[in-house]
Image (cartoon, rainbow, N blue to C red):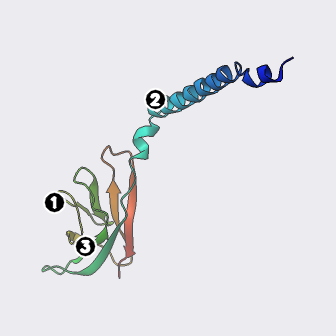
Amino acid sequence: MEFKQLLDDDRAVSPVIGVILMVAITVILAAVIGSFVLGLGNSVQQTAPNANFQFEFGQDGAGNDVVNVTHTGGDTIPANERVSLNTSVGSTAFSGGEMSAGDSITGVQYSSGETVRVLWVSQNGDTSQALAEETAP
């Protein structure tokens, strides 16, 4: 047996690498197709924005207790996602397109001692989350 022939004989390397690559590509394709078939691809993109809000409690001209909430910073919320201020007395959605720092939802009545929440609902309506909450005086 010749030593030089042993070092030059690499016929088995290519088929092994080829099989490993084919298996890896198959697994990756199956994972991608499976995630879209099961709807996981869409829900990954539906994350709640990270935004800050300031609550101001007071009274309107008729003597009703009302709360105003102002977006004070963080992510801009696109117009196709709904943001609303919810209390036990009522609810008002922001209607000015996209909501960015400085925008407000005003004049929502509340009851003393209740928790007032700013709620976000995703574009397709599948996901919702409370972005901020505060207890009314």
Classify mark 2: helix, strand or loop: helix
Does the image show residue 99? yes
Tell me the kind of residue under disc 1. Answer: Gly
Q: In the rendered image of this protein, does residue 31 appear above or below residue 70?
A: above
Q: Which residue is mark 1?
A: 96
Tell me the kind of residue under disc 3. Answer: Thr
Q: Which residue is mark 2?
A: 37
Depth check, mark 2 against mark 3: the one in front is 2
**Quadrant in which the C terminus appears:** bottom left
Nearer to me, 5 or 76: 5
Q: Quadrant of residue 63?
A: bottom left
Q: Which residue is mark 3?
A: 70
Identify the residue shown where x is 48% and y is 32%: 32
Q: Position of residue 79 (x, y in %)?
A: 22, 53
Q: Are marks 2 and 3 in contact (CB under 8 Å)?
A: no
Outermost right residue: 1
Return the disc, 2 or 3, that comes first in the chain's sequence. 2
Return the disc, 3 or 1, that comes first in the chain's sequence. 3
Tell me the kind of residue under disc 2. Answer: Val
CA gap, disc 2 and disc 3? 40 Å
Q: Rate crowding at label 1 as few (under 14), some (14 to 19) or many (20 or more) other CA atoms within 10 Å.
A: few
**Quadrant in which the N terminus appears:** top right
